Every structure is written in C-alpha cells, then in structure tokens.
Amino acid sequence: MQNKQMSMADTLGLGFMTFAFFLGAGNLIFPPLAGFLSGENMTLAMIGFLITAVTLPLITLIAVAKANGKIMGLLPPVAATIFAIAIYLVIGPAFAAPRAGLVAYEMGLKPFLADSSATFMLAGIALNVSQLIYSVIFFGMAMLLSLYPGKLLDSVGKILTPIMIILLVGLAISVIMLPGFDVGPAMGDYQTHPLTKGILEGYNTMDTLASLIFGMLIIDILRRKGVSDSKDQTKYLIRAALIAAAGLAFVYISLFYLGASAGEFAIGADNGGTILTKYVNHEFGSLGQVLLAAVVTLACLTTVIGLVTACAEFFNSILPRISYKTFVVIMALASAIVANVGLSQLISISVPVLYTIYPVAIALVAVTFLTDKFAMPALSHRIVLSVALVFGIIDGLKAAGFNMSFIDFMPMHNEGMAWLLPTGLAIMVCLFIKKSKAEPILG
C-alpha cells in the first residue's frame, strides 16, 4: 500500500480538528473560575493549570505516537483492557461527554429561555423539560456526525473549528482591550499553594485522559487518509498536537485573565460558565450572548463527536459482534441520559474519580518515554502503574470526603498529590533493576 503525504491544508485541518476535540466543556468553564479564585496569585495558578491542561496532553499525544498507538502494550492484557475501559467510560458516557452537553445547554440555550424551570416526573425522578429536549437534539446531532468517522477531518477540522477559532479570538481580544475590574485577593487553597491547586484544577479538563484516546483516533484518521508509514503518522500527529497545544494555551490564558478581572460578574458563581456568560452579556449585550452560545455549542459538539467516535471504535474492537454504528447510538443515548443529572452534581461526582485515575495516566506517559531505559520494561510498567494506582485511590478517597488523616505524614497528601513522590521513586527503582542472569545448573 502506497504511503501518502499530507498537504499543508490537511495538516492544518488535522491540527484544528485535534484542537476542537480538546476544546470542550471543561476548557471553557474551569479557567475563568480558577482565574477569579486565584486573584493576585493568578500567574502561579495558571502555570499549574497549563501543566496539566496543555503540556501533559501534548506530551501524551507524543507518547501515543511513540508507542505507535499501543501505549498500553506492555501491560497484562486484562489490566490494559480494564484500564482502557475505565478511561473510555470516564471521558465518554460517564462524565466528559454528558458534561459537554450540559455546558452547551447552560451557556448555549438557557440564557435565552424566559422560563427554564419546568419539570416533569419520570420513574420518580424530576427532569427539566428544556434540558431533556436539548439533550436529545444535541446528542442526536453528535450521533449523526459520528456515524461517518472518515468524514471527521473535513466536517470538524476544516469547517466547524475555523468558525469557532474566529469567535474565540474575538473574545480573547475583548478581554485584553476592554478594561476589567481590579484583580482581587486569592481565595481558599489558592492563597497557600496556588501552583499545586492549579495543577489539580487542570485535571478537570480531562485532557490528558482524552489524549490517550484521541492519539489513537488521529492515527486511525491518518490511516484512512492513506498515511500508512508509522514515522509519518508520528510526524503528523506531533504537528497536530503542537497546533492544538498552542490553541489551548491561548484560550486558557485569555479565560484566566477574564476570571481574574471579572470582579462583580463572578460574585456567587459556582462555575466559570456563569462568569463567562455574565461578562459577555455585560460587554456585548444580546449579540455577544448569541456569539458565545455559538462558540460553546460548537466547542462542546466537536468534543462530543470525538468522544463518541473514539468510544464506539474502542468498544467495537473488544466486542466486534456489535457494530460500530450500534455503539455510536448506545454512547450518544447513554450520554444524553447522564446529561440530565445536572452540571454541579456531575462535576462533584467526577472529581474523586479523576484524582484516582489521573496519576495512572500520567505514570503511563512517563514510563512510555522511559521504556528504552528499563532493563525489564514490562515489569517496570506494571510496578510503576500499580504504585500510581494505589496512591491515586488514596487521593481519590480523600477528595470524596473520606477521613484519610492517618497518612497526613505523606508529602503533598494535603494538596491531593500523595501519588507523586512514591510514583517517582518507583520509576527510579525500576531504572536500576538489572536483568537477572540465569542461575548455573549444579550437577
């Protein structure tokens, strides 16, 4: 099979598509609130946020390329499958995809409704009428666009994303040009350790987890485009990753600054979406509100398309008897159902899960780059990921509200990063493990 080369336009399209996949709900709602809460400590908090929300996803995409899409290849098959299922469920129908639909509703439609409080009872559960109707339409559109993954590069990368980028650039320019309020004092954890708080806040974007999945999806899209050589696939994936990382950093810095200078717009806000909506409404009126609704809807829709496509392809690969298109329908339907839980509740449920699973994902990326340095790569991968999982569970239980004071002596436990030092030590130990020589047979 002949290996094709991609044109500059196709490479840019791939980069824009990668950016669009990442730029979803969490990318828009977390930075403004973090900017507001960090106040005078915004710079350190923003650096921390950029580490986990830009640098780590970029490194993860490169790690996926380095491993030729088989980043879990050195784990036992059962463990690799369980970990992959957990990641696909978290970034798919359990959290990330429904959250994107919820944010699209909260910021894209709700501000225009005169009354959005009408509910009805179904099986003893109160459901919001407008939210339910919106979820059905939103995830229905995502489902239709996900049914034909071969057209993703054209529909998402070359059409939807450029529109979204133009609107985001306009918002970013307004944040810089229009005078805001004075930056206030830091609040809560941002007063004492803004850097680590910013790092943990970056978890909420779920972008490092998504990178594990999107990396494989992009490689698959490249194959469909006729790029069969693994070195070329790595080259184009890295270029796409750099374009996406630059775009994400631009958006985050703008939104952090917006939040820090939001002043009275941020009072009483429980998520950054509220701050962003109030800011745009004040500065640009109804036209700004319409443009923001368009940005948010496009951002969330393109993310959900990527997530539904990736999840359907994965579950089809482990259960080939069920078709890809059937899984697309299942994923879209499950996401629509979970989306009717409510944004605040969904975020509060997801945090302990992310504190548990993120350390394992970060450790996986680290050992992927160090594979050639390990004398016993498979054993090293298993040891390091096991340590990261154990301490990730400890951090997750603490985030869920369990009393974990018996391990307060551990470095960075109070900051929610108890996993970092043990995992680093495990990596160091594995670097010094030597292959055992065969014992001589005694006669």
Image: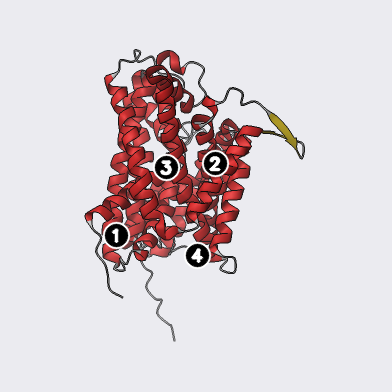
Q: Which residue is mark 1?
A: 234
Give the side of residue 6 with respect to residue 152, left or right. Answer: left
The reply to whether the C-beta atoms of the residues labelled 2 and 1 are less than 8 Å apart is: no
Q: Which mark is residue 129?
A: none
Most distant residue in the left direction: 8
Most distant residue in the right direction: 124
* Vertical comparison of 375 with 298: above or below: below
The earlier-in-sequence mark between 4 and 3 is: 4
Q: Which residue is mark 4?
A: 76
Residue at 53% from the left image edge and 62% from the top image edge = 324
Q: Which residue is mark 3?
A: 420
Please state which of residues 255 and 156 is positioned toward the viewer in this rendering: 156
The earlier-in-sequence mark between 2 and 1 is: 1
- Local packing at callout 3 (Cα closer than 10 Å; few below 14, some 14-19, many 20+) is some
Instruction: Please tell me whether mark 1 or mark 3 is closer to you in this view.
Output: 1
Q: Quadrant of residue 343?
A: top right
- Local packing at callout 1 (Cα closer than 10 Å; few below 14, some 14-19, many 20+) is many
* Vertical comparison of 320 with 365: above or below: below
Residue at 28% from the left image edge and 73% from the top image edge = 2
Q: Quadrant of residue 291?
A: top left
Residue at 61% from the left image edge and 48% from the top image edge = 334
Query: Residue 132 in the image: x percent, y percent?
Result: 63, 38
Q: Which residue is mark 2?
A: 394
The secondary structure type at the circle numbered 3 is: helix
The earlier-in-sequence mark between 1 and 3 is: 1
